[in-house]
Image (cartoon, rainbow, N blue to C red):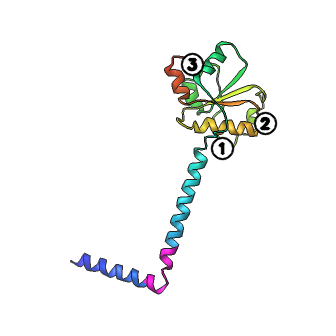
Amino acid sequence: MLVITQAKNYCTRVMQNETENGGLTRKINSFYLAVLILMTIGIATIAYASHPEIQRMPIDELKKLIDSKADVIILDAQLKDIYDKGHIKGALSLPWKAEVREADVEKFDKDKLTVTYCDCGPGEADSSDLAGQLIGLGFTNVKILQDPSIRGWKKAGYPTE
């Protein structure tokens, strides 16, 4: 019974405080909640930016290009240790990072067909963001390997190394 009485007294004090300061505490809490929600949405939007304007390349199309010995740059956006465990044969490691710099890509021909991939699932978040950054650095022919990307490549039995 004592706990119920204490809780009731606490609630009464909170309500009196809210009444005395015009509900300021509630307004401040609502403001912080709104800011938190907006920040979460903003971070999610940035993290999952899928760049729908960048063309996706089906797995079979990339396989045909490789088989025909086409001049194509294939970039694996996964972490280096994941790349080292197995990647599309001929792919180069360029792990995703928030800001790719000119020095990171100076060895690549910006006019060659460049295909990025990751293992991020629908939206291809890392490879999509990497592709967008490459375009921002002046690459002229960038595509993203369509989901299921490396998983689909491996499932099809296509070569990895």
The image quadrant where one finds the N terminus is bottom left
Residue 96 visible in the displayed image: no
According to the picture, the residue beneath numbered tag 2 turns out to be 138
**Mark 2: few/some/many CA within 10 Å (<14, 14-19, 20+):** few
Residue at x-position 51% and y-position 65%: 33
Q: CA distance from mark 2 to mark 1?
A: 17 Å
In the displayed structure, 17 sits above or below 28; it is: below
Q: Secondary structure at mark 1?
A: loop
Percent coordinates x, y for residue 72 in the rendering? 71, 22
Residue 151 visible in the displayed image: yes
Residue at x-position 58% and y-position 52%: 43
Discs 2/3, front: 2
Task: Report the disc number at residue 160.
Answer: 3
**Magenta stretch holds residue 12:** no
**Mark 1: few/some/many CA within 10 Å (<14, 14-19, 20+):** few
- Residue 16, located in which quarter of the rendered image? bottom left
Task: Identify the amino acid type marked 3.
Answer: Thr
Task: Report the disc number at residue 98.
Answer: 1
Contact check, label 1 and label 3, Cβ < 8 Å: no
Q: CA distance from mark 2 to mark 3?
A: 29 Å
- Range of residues picked out in magenta: 17-27
Q: Secondary structure at mark 2?
A: loop
